[in-house]
Structures are given as C-alpha cells and as structure tokens.
Amino acid sequence: MRNMKRVLSLLLLQFSFFGLAASAQTVSPIIVECGKKCRGEFSITNNGLTALAVSVEARSFSLDALGHTTNRPLDPGVDLKLEEGSTRISPKDTHAFAYQLKCAAPPCSVALLSSMVVGHTTEGILVRVQLAHTIYACEKQKDCRKKVRAAAGVTVD
Amino acid sequence: MLRVCLCVLLLGVPVSAQVLQLSGGRSTLLGGTGGEITAFFPESTLSASAGFANGHFVFGASDTFKFHGLDVTAGDKNFGYSFDGAGLGVSTRGLFVQRNTRHTSFAVFVGSTGIGYATPFMVIAKAQHIGAGFFLQRQFDNGLLLSSLAVIDGGKHTAVQGLSYRSHLLHLAGSGGLLQNQKYFTGEADFQPFRSLSFSATHNDFFLVDHLTTNSLSAFAGLGHITLQASLLDGQYRLLKTTGASAGASLRIGSTTLRSNFYESNHRVLLVHVAQEHFHRWTISGIVNQLQGQTSFAFGGGYQGNKISVSLDHSVLFFPVSGKGFQQTTTVQVSLRIHDTALNFQTNVDPMMHVQYSTYASSYVQGPVAGRAMNNHSHSAGGKFMIAGAVIDEHGQPVEGAAIQLQGGAVVYSDSQGKFFAHVKRDKPSALVVLLPEFATPGRWAVVTCPADAVPGTDVLIKVRREIAP
C-alpha cells in the first residue's frame, strides 16, 4: 500500500507540471562554397516530437554593405535542380535534400529556404520557421564567399 | 508490488500523453535485451524499461520534469559525465536534480548507485549501494573549463577534478583523482601551430575487469590534396604491455581517395592500401592487406539515404587488452526508416576482439492531445519527369503547407508561394488528391477546384477555401 501511494504521488507530481513543450529544427551545413557547377545536399533535422512538413524554396540574393541579404526569385543564369521540393520529416529524424547547381554567370549567391509550419498563435497567426542553406558559386571554389562579400562592399564579419 | 503498480499505471499513461516513444532491442555488446516506453508530456517525460541483463530480469522507471528552473529526475538515471572526450558514467536510482545555465552546469543526486544498463532501447539502474554525489562544471570566457565530480557509494569514494583550456593553437584537457578508491587520470594535449599541421598526445585510464592504461602520440599534416599521419601507441592491461606504431598517407583526386597505411605491433607489420570512390550517396572501397608476406583483398562501402543507410567497413584497431596490437576489423551497420519507426542493426568488436551486435527499433506514436499529427505517407517519388503546380485560396492568395498526394502514394507540400513539385518516373498523367487532413497550415479547409490528374511538364492549379480558422 505504501508503494502504491508512492507511485500515485509520482504520477500526480508529473501531471502537475503540464505546460508548453519547446522544440527546435536545425539545418546543416549553413553555407557552402563551390565552383560554377556543383552538386551537394543539406540536411534538416526535426528535433521535435511530432512530424513536420518541410518545403524548400530557392532564391537568389544580394548583400548590402552591412551584410544584410535581399532575396529575389532565382536569377536567369542560375540552373538549380532540387531532388525534392518538400517532404515530411519524422520526429527526431534528419532528411537530406540533394541539389545540382549550374551558374552561367558567376558569382551566384543562392539561398535554399526550408520552411516549416510549427504551429499558430491563439489569434490564428501562422508560426513558420525558415532555415537557410546558402550556396556561393564562383569560377573557383576557394574563398568564394569572401570574394562575393568583398564585391558587395561588406566590411563586417 | 511496486513494479506491478508501475507497470499498470504506465500502461494508462498513453491515454493522456502527447507523444509516446516505444523502443525495444537486443545488444550482446551491452549485455541486454529489453524495451522501453517513454511518454512525453509538455513539461515532463515518464519512462519505464524492462528486460533481461546478463540473464537477470531488470526493471526501471523514471519521471523527468521541470521544477523552478531545475531538471528533476525521480527514478533511474544514467548520468554521463563527459569531459572533452573522456567520459564517466554513474547509474543512479533515486532523486537527481540538475541545473544548466549558459556557463554553469550543476547536478546533485541522492539514492542508490549500482550497475547501469544504458542502451538506446532501455535505461535501468540496478541498485547496489546507498549513494550521493554532485557534479559542477563552469565554462569561462577565456576558454577555460573546470569541473568537479564527487560521489560516495557503498563506502567507495569518487573525487574527480577536470580542467580544460582551448586557445587558437593549443587545447589541453585533463581529469583525474579517485574513481571508486582507485587512482584515475585521463589527459589530452593538442597543438596546432599551422592550420595544416597538428600534434596530439593522450593518456587514458579505463576500468574493465582490471585496470587498462593507454598512451598515444600522433601527428597530422594536410598539404592540399595530400594528408600524412603518424602515431605511436602503447597499452598495459594486467602484466601485458602492447606497443604499436602506424604511419600513412592519403591522396584525394576528385571523388577518389587513395590511402596507404603501415602498422607495426608485436614485431608484426601490416600494410593496408585502400582506394575509395565517393558517388552521390554511395561509397565503394577496395582494400588490399599485406601481412607477413600474405596478401588478401576486401571490399567495403555503403549507401547513405533518407530511408535506408547501409555500410560495410574495414578498419584497423589497436587491441591492448588482448595484447594483439593492430588488427583488421570488419563492422556492418544497417539503418532503416519506415514511417516514424527507425530500425537499426550494427556490429562492433569488443576489447577482447569478440564480434558483438546490437539491434533495436524505436517508434513514435502521437497521443490524443499532441495536436496536428500528420499520418504516415511516402514522400519521395524520384524520376526524371516533373509534376508541378500551385495551390491558392478563393482570393487568389497562395496557400502554404497544402498536402497533395500523387499516384503511387507520394505526398508533397506547397511552399510559401503556394507552389509544389514532384519528380515522377513515367511521362504520363498522374492522379492528384488534395489531402485536407494532412495540411500543415492550421484551420479546416475545403477543396474548391482540383484537376483529377496532372500531366508532367504542365502546371496544375488547385483552389481551396478555408472553412474554419484555427
């Protein structure tokens, strides 16, 4: 009987700490550098306990002097082939999105934005997480990001 | 009686749990067979494990929750104290309280300690002694990390102090003291004068059936596509002392890597030459071994995909416990994912050079209060033809997170522009179904218009209407 009381108190203790769960999603790698043609992939990890629908959108972007980005539709010289445009990621699972990129007029700066709806507020406003995988494509892979940033006049790290 | 009550109550928990994780498996390496059920609540996690370990029935349960900013575990807990690569584990049954801040981690426990069975599929602490202890770790901004672990269990004392320092050129880490009344020290020093050149020295104390001590010295140089490495190792177990030396070079040309390594131990020389080719998600290796005038060949490789990964690896390991020095080992690993269930199988070679295996499965089940939980569907079609389209609402605005199922069962989701695409294998019309319950966007939706099928190369337009806001 004493054991039973102990067990019940254990469960009561547990039910009394009911609140909101927090989870996070991650993208890896964040940045890649490559030549005019490249083939790569990036991974999205669902660290949460429920499945997530993820869609991927490609954008060209430019930088201002402070390193802030401005996204726009893909430039005409960028030929990007995504293996998948969306998927469902199981709890605690990682999904790799593969792509091929050809850049006709280097350098090309492309962001692959992975969007996932993670919930909504009580007012009905959608809560969406967007994680970017950034590709810098130049004539030569080495120091491509540095060259793109220098060309944009970025002075901060 | 306690065990029966816990079992009965835990079986009732799924009704109120948000998410359940079910795991089960067997491991000859970790000496156990069993399973675990974990119920995730928003602020607490309740789990129960049962199985057989070394021929005995074992049972454990734990409840982890937050209390005034503290992480509290009541029940079984395998507390891993990891310090810059070196780890100690303490298995406790009782009350465990932990607090983590940006720079400080503090933990204290009271209860019993004993043999722990911490596997991916069950966590059980077998109570043997009354014990108590604390752990404190503090990270400083200048790269210094200090830690202390103190445990008293069954009259045995553990008092380990750790220190780590990391700078641009140098990394020093060491922990030492008493581990259950035995002297213990583990240390590592890494020096990297240039980006392409590094030196490393390690000393480790392990407690298997007896005390094992290992030391190593190694150097690494990377020169563009060429890498060079050399190392000296020694180990002492009981009265047996084993020494070894290795050196090697590798050359990377495009997706091909060529590697040659020399290993010497116990007056025996082993030469291993490997040619490895990396494809998109494939790796294929051809291996030539030369040992005392005899040549043998082996093949390895693997595939790393989203649903399945398989590998067959050959590697050379140093075995100081058995006194055999460098030995070629082969390991197999297979991982499968079927919907929300992960299946794993892998082999390992233990310090006595016995091949052991571990196999386990783990699955997530969404409970009634988990909120939106998408059902299990296939999400990768593949192929060279593309079906594309867009989903809009009655006002012509794009709808993000709309789920569309194609012929064959593949499901795709629309992006923030309402656009979706999928690759299909055949250049012929594919049936389309809008999966309203699968929408990632909250609210209740209805289909206004949707073509019955989609032809590769032409865009389809789907119109939906939100009936009830979230």
Image (cartoon, coloured by chain):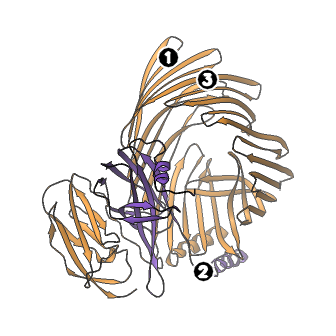
- On screen, residue B253 above or below B87: above
Locate residue B7, reporting x and y percent.
58, 69
Among the chains pictured, the one given orange colouring is B
- Foreground label between 2 and 3: 3
Locate residue B224, reporting x and y percent.
51, 31
Q: Which residue is mark 3?
A: B246
Quadrant (top left, top right, bottom left, bottom right) of the C terminus of chain B:
bottom left
Amino acid, disc 3: Ser
Tell me how far mark 3 sits from mark 1, CA to CA: 14 Å
Residue visible at 62% across and 71% down in the picture: B6
Q: Secondary structure at mark 3?
A: strand
Locate residue B392, reporting x and y percent.
26, 78
Side (left or right) of B117 relative to A127: right
Amino acid, disc 2: Phe
Residue B286 visible? The answer is yes
Q: Chain of mark 2?
A: A
Side (left or right) of B111 relative to B36: right
Q: Which residue is mark 1?
A: B290
